[in-house]
Amino acid sequence: MTRALRHWAAVIAFVGPFLFMLLMFQYVPVARMLWDSLWDFALLNPDKRTFVGLGNYLDLFDDPDRRQAFLVTFGFAAGVVLTVIPVSFLVAVYLNGTLPARAIVRAVVFLPVVTSAVVIATMWTFLLDPNNGLINGALVILGLPKLAFLTSKAQALPSVIGMMLWQQTGFATVLFLSGLQGIPRDLEDAARVDGCSALQRLRHVVIPLLSRTTVFIVVIMTVFSLQAFAPALIMTSGGPEGTTNFVAFDIYQLAFSLQQPGLASAVSAVFMAVVMGISLVQMRLLRTRWTY
Amino acid sequence: MKRILPLLGAAVILVVILTIFLGPYAWIVASSFKPQFAIFRDLNPISWGTFIPANPTIENFIHLFANRGVGRALINSAIVSSCQVLGTLFLCSMAAYGLTRIRFKGAGIVFGIVLMTFLLPIESLMVPLFMHVSKLGMQDTLVGVFIPWIASPFGLFMLRQAFEDLPRELDEAATIDGAGHWRIFWSIVLPNVRTTLATLALVTFLFSWNAFLWPLVIIQSPKNQLIQLAIAQSVAIGQLPNWGETFAGATIATIPLIVLFLFLQRYFVRGIALTGVKG
């Protein structure tokens, strides 16, 4: 009896604190989010509330602003994935060759990964400044016209995608690079003996063998992009005309500026379901065996 | 000629890559040592002066520390990040020990509970968490910034893996010698997973130092200001930003991480690759 007691005391002592904190700060808030999404109230006075049932969810799907926020966020994620994958793959192939300064180049492309989202958004606000920005300065030197970037409805989202590409390339490159280095040397040698050109070897040997790595990078980049917040807050305020109004920023605005935490909770719940759904589907793909 | 061309090509690509990735940093750092008018003057047109200050001044930095409370923000950030690192290491390593070294009924369920939170985006938690943490009386406190994140599912996963890889013969021998769980945990398991602990500490520090959304929500008063919030505030839309000062702030906030990164690159890359799934 005392042995069993001692056993459970040890279990509780070791696992209890973690579990308690996890329930306290992850599960309770999720429950609270689902509950709050059924009410209409203000953050300033959360106890004075009216029950609206699924009303917030109906509003959410009805409201063009909310729909736009989700579309913008998906478009952003798609843009980031579609640019980061090819660019980082090429950089990785380049770094995988015999290059004297490889370690330095790898460290340099990785720098933006350890720099905070705030510093990067700040940096790029000034890089993209329509009048005194560094990028427009470079365009002028090349004899090209200046661009409006973040102040233009058409260019704002692509500009932020460009920033994210710059920020995430290093991360994806390092992952691709370790994938490339995992490819057995003799496979490529065999293809070379069989008369495959460098391009053919890339197409028929290297790329198929990297499919697992690629899916992994797609998952990470999708999740990172869906969670974008700092660019909207620091660079654009979600504008112009909502073209960079990411869902995370929309939730923040709804709850803390517009005092509609009920609606914000409903948006949060839908957002959580979407992000977890996408991650699960992609991870399922990741678990599939890719044999060649 | 045939051998020179590819070499030349590789060199050109090298210069392009270095320019694209280092250029913005060089510009920010150089401009942080310039007064506002010089930043604009040196951009039209771009020249060496854009990236190397002709008459460097530390005016921007002095102003930041004297009038903007950046010193305070740096100290606060250091406190928050250190506490988050210690808390995470403590909770996660205890739980990882419990799940790998003590056989108990329900371990699978506990692991399932942790697994479920792995993909939870924190952006969706900000509103309910804000209300919850406020109710606990931790709104606008430094404790409120780090306490919700120390039970890190990612940390538990990483350590659990390392603990599993450690041969069980080690602690079985210690049990025969009469050592209890606490002793085995403290003097046998932990010293053998030092590398993983260091990696987790580094990644946690990085995330904590760079965190923005949650601190923005939970902190209001200037005395609890964190460094990322201070920078974000100086570019706030609608204000006429002081470019030099903002750049100086960005430089100060980034230097500690870059120094850590240059010395501990290997751990960084390994740790961040592992966080991938959590995002």
Image (tube, rainbow, N blue to C red):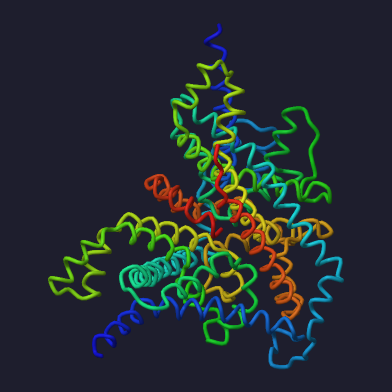
Residue A199, picture quadrant: top right
Closest to the observer: A194 or B112?
Answer: A194
**From the viewer's perspective, is A202 left or right of B107?**
right
In the rendered image, the vertical position of residue B172 relative to residue B133, given as above or below = above
Q: Quadrant of residue A202?
A: top right
Q: Quadrant of the C terminus of chain B?
A: bottom right
In the rendered image, the residue lying farthest to the top is B1
For residue A244, above or below residue A57: above
- Please state the horizontal and vertical placement of residue B111, each as a whole percent of the image: 46, 71
Q: Residue at x 78, y 31 (%)?
A: A144
Seen in the picture, residue A240 relative to A155 is either above or below; the reply is below
The percent position of residue B130, horizontal first and vertical second, equals 60, 78
**Residue A133 on image: x %, y %:** 70, 43
- Residue B107 at x, y = what percent? 41, 74
- The residue closer to the viewer here, B4 or B54, is B4
Residue B49 visible within the image:
no
Front residue of this view, candidates A7 and A118: A7
The quarter of the picture where the N terminus of chain B appears is top right
